[in-house]
Image (cartoon, rainbow, N blue to C red):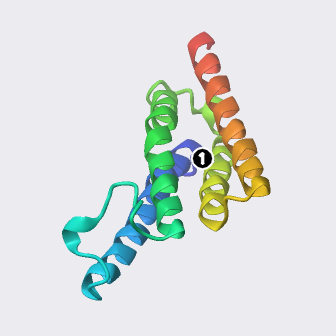
Amino acid sequence: MNNASVTVLIGLVVWTLFLLILMETIRTRYVVTRAVAANEFKPDNSNLSAFMQRLARAHANCIESLPIFGILLVTALLTNRASVTNPLAPWLFAARVVQSCVHLASISVAAVNVRFVVFAVQIAIAVYWAYALLVS
């Protein structure tokens, strides 16, 4: 099956899972090396490095947006209207990955501006999909 909506739906889940596995791998290393006790982790990693804090936030961003994008993609698929979501689905996924990667790399003003632009792209695509699915 070559359906961009299906591929991107799975991709969004896999990307979110990748960030979680990365975070938990690093946390496991902290526990194994006794740098941090297993019961001392904070949900936002605020007691860890700046990178780990950004990783927690990037993962949370994915968790927060997955229901919105996922429901729109699933709705299109279940109602046989993937033609609405297929053309922009790869762009949504690319923007999501860029946002996460930039978030992990830096919190400079330029990086935050890039994150905002790719976030705005994702929101614009979601708004378009919601409108198109409602009126089609």
Name the quadrant containing residue 88: top right
Kindly state the secondary structure of the residue where label 1 is placed. helix
**Residue shown at the point (21%, 72%) measured from the top left:** 38
Work out which residue is located at the far front of the displayed protein and give it: 47
The mark total stands at 1
Work out which residue is located at the far left of the displayed protein and give it: 39
Residue 44 x %, y %: 40, 55
Instruction: Look at mark 1 in the image and give the residue it sits on.
Output: 4
The image shows residue 110, relative to residue 29, as above or below, that is above
The image shows residue 76, relative to residue 16, as above or below, that is above
Work out which residue is located at the far top of the displayed protein and give it: 135
The image shows residue 84, relative to residue 110, as above or below, that is above
Residue 30 x %, y %: 33, 80
**Residue shown at the point (53%, 67%) measured from the top left:** 50
On the question of residue 87 being in view, the answer is no
Viewer-closest of 41 and 92 = 41
**Residue shown at the point (51%, 30%) measured from the top left:** 72
Label 1 crowd bin: few (<14), some (14–19), many (20+), radius 10 Å: some
The image shows residue 12, relative to residue 20, as above or below, that is above
Viewer-closest of 25 and 73 = 25
Residue 27 x %, y %: 34, 73
